[in-house]
Structures are given as C-alpha cells and as structure tokens.
C-alpha cells in the first residue's frame, strides 16, 4: 500500500504503466478490469516491486519491529512507514517538489483513466481530493491513512492506532528504510541521482544487534 513509492518508481514509464503500478491493489476492490497491455505491464511491475520488498532483509527486520497484536498487519504498516520516510527525505530522490511531482503525475493518470476505466477513475478522483499521497508525512496523516484502511474490511480493523507503532519505532524503522530504498532503486531504477546511504544509522544497527 505504499502508493507514493509506487508512483515514484514508475514516473518515467508511459502513463498507462504508471496507472497500473499505482492502482494494482485496487483492481479487485473496485471491480475494474485491466484496460490495456500497458496497464497490465504496470500491474506486473507493481507485483515485482512488492515481491522484492517483501523478500528484502531490511523489510523483514522492519516488520519484526511491529509488536503484537498488530504484527500480523506489519506488512501494511511498514509500507505506510516507508512512504512516511520517503516524504521526509524526498529532496534526496527527486529535484521536483513533492506536491508538484504528485499532482502532475496523478493528473496525467486521471486523464488516462477517464476514457479507459470508470471505476479506477472514480477511485483516483477520491485519492486526489483527499490528498492521500501528500498526507503520509505527518502523524495526523498517518492516523487518517490507517483509519481509511481499517474501514475497508473487518480483518483490517487492527490497523487503527498503527501510527503509534511507527512513532514508537521511528529511528529503527528509518534505518530499515535507508537500508532498503537504495537497493530498491538499484533494482527498479527511476533515473534518479545517486543515493547516498545515511551512515548515521550504523550505530543504531550496531546497538540493536547487541
């Protein structure tokens, strides 16, 4: 569910690929069909990114930081946490201001969906109006994100309050993100400037391993 990261990683792809990568998780929920081959390629990209993230050692370590009883939902919580850190470190990854980047790309995807998928077009209208992708950087935004997710299905109700788990483990989660994200960019390069790992996390890793 890390929508900002998915949008970022496909920003230099054709717009239908961007749409598929961004919205792959919403196909079943909206009942939408895949409109064309390029969108399908975006869905495949999304799934490849998710599989890589799930298997990465830093992501597995991040999930272990989420305590019971929400650990069964740790994958979702870590996804959202990663978008929190991407928001706060945006200048490292893009020369464009975050709001400009998000608004331009969502507008392009929205225009593409208008004639290709009414269900996804309606969904993205809601995403844009709610400024979902610009809300991950604050405690209030995280709370609203988890409230929105928790309302979708009874199994997700445990996400209520998950922003407190992120706040309680903020420093080690940040180190996991900074271990993971450069590797993700190397695997799925979005034509970014060279990313330098933050060495301030080294002492945190050393202390956590003792």
Image (spheres, grey):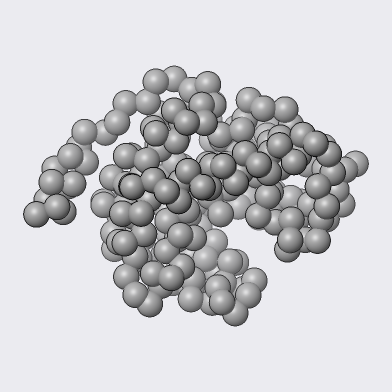
Residue 76 in view in this figure:
yes
Say whether residue 56 is left or right of residue 208: right
Q: Nearer the viewer, residue 28 or 149?
A: 28
Q: Is residue 168 above or below residue 158?
A: above
Q: Quadrant of the C terminus?
A: bottom left
Q: Is residue 186 above or below residue 118?
A: above
Where residue 186 appears, x then y in whole percent? 44, 28
Q: Residue at x 64, y 71 (%)?
A: 152
Where residue 1 appears, x then y in whole percent? 56, 54
Say whether residue 84 is left or right of residue 109: left
Where residue 199 appears, x then y in whole percent? 21, 33
Q: Residue furthest bottom?
A: 154
Say whether residue 64 is left or right of residue 125: left
Q: Residue at x 49, y 71 (%)?
A: 159
Q: Nearer the viewer, residue 44 or 35?
A: 44
- Give the mark count: 0
Q: Residue at x 65, y 55 (%)?
A: 25
Residue 84 in view in this figure:
no
Q: Is residue 62 above or below residue 71?
A: above
Q: Is residue 176 above or below residue 141?
A: above
Q: Residue furthest right?
A: 115
Where residue 27 appears, x then y in whole percent? 74, 56
Q: Quadrant of residue 68?
A: bottom left
Say whether residue 89 is left or right of residue 130: left
Q: Nearer the viewer, residue 153 or 45?
A: 45
Q: Residue at x 54, y 42 (%)?
A: 49
């Amino acid at each position: 569910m890390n929508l900002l990261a998915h949008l970022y990683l496909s920003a230099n792809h054709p717009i239908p690929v961007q749409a598929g990568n961004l919205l792959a998780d919403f196909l079943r929920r909206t009942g939408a069909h895949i409109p064309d081959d390029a969108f399908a390629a975006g869905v495949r990209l999304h799934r490849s990114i998710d599989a890589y993230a799930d298997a990465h050692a830093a992501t597995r370590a991040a999930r272990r930081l989420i305590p019971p009883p929400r650990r069964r939902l740790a994958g979702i919580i870590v996804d959202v946490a990663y978008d929190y850190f991407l928001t706060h470190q945006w200048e490292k990854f893009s020369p464009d201001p975050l709001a400009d980047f998000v608004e331009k790309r969502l507008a392009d995807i929205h225009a593409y969906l208008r004639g290709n998928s009414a269900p996804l077009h309606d969904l993205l209208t809601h995403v844009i109006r709610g400024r979902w992708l610009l809300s991950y950087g604050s405690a209030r935004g995280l709370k609203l994100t988890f409230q929105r997710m928790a309302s979708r299905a009874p199994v997700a109700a445990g996400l209520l309050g998950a922003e407190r788990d992120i706040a309680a483990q903020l420093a080690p989660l940040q180190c996991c993100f900074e271990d993971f994200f450069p590797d993700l960019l190397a695997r799925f390069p979005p034509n970014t400037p060279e990313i330098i790992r933050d060495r301030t996390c080294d002492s945190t890793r050393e202390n956590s391993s003792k």
